[in-house]
Image (spheres, grey):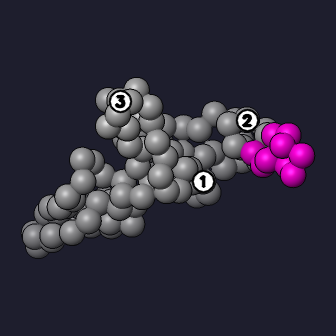
Amino acid sequence: MVRVAIVGGGAAACALAHAASARHRVSLFEMGRGPGGRTATRASRDLPTLALDHGAPAFRATTHAFRNLCDQLVLERVLARVEPGAVGTLARDGTYHAEPAAAAAASPRYAAAPPR
């Protein structure tokens, strides 16, 4: 079995580590407090109960295989499923328009799980 080192724990590196782990011995090195890079949710140092999404707040799982992987990561408390209605658009007049429920059901959104 080939040993593979992956430096950085962002979304792409985590996906690579997952895919490579089927055939190789993978070590992932991340200097931050946890995986996810710019997709991770971080806690505020001043207000530890405040969760901050400082990058991509969520992403869609559009294929069956990717959805299965994301659902497994939800069980492991790495990801959280974004509830329908939580994503939408803000109109110029300040009104919020939630994403249609059919769109949310067709390809669910996921986000980094809140820090434990």
2 falls in the magenta region:
no
Q: Secondary structure at mark 2?
A: loop
Which quadrant would the C terminus be assigned to in this image? Answer: top left
Q: Is residue 12 visible?
A: yes
Q: Which mark is residue 85?
A: 2
Q: Position of residue 83 (x, y in %)?
A: 63, 33
Nearest to the eye among marks 1 and 3: give it.
3
- Element at label 1: strand
| Tag 3: amino acid | Pro
* Left or right: 36, with 107 as reference point: left
Expressed as whole percent of the image width and height from the top left, the position of residue 88 reads: 75, 45
Q: Between disc 2 and disc 3, whose residue precedes?
A: 3
Residue found 20% across the figure and 58% down from its top? 31
Which portion, as a residue range, is magenta? 88-96
Whether pointer 2 and pointer 1 mark residues with C-beta atoms closer than 8 Å, the reply is: no
Which residue has dot 1 on it?
Answer: 60
The reply to whether dot 1 and dot 3 touch (C-beta < 8 Å) is no
CA gap between label 2 and label 3 equals 26 Å
Q: Which residue is mark 3?
A: 48
For badge 2, the amino acid type reads: Gly
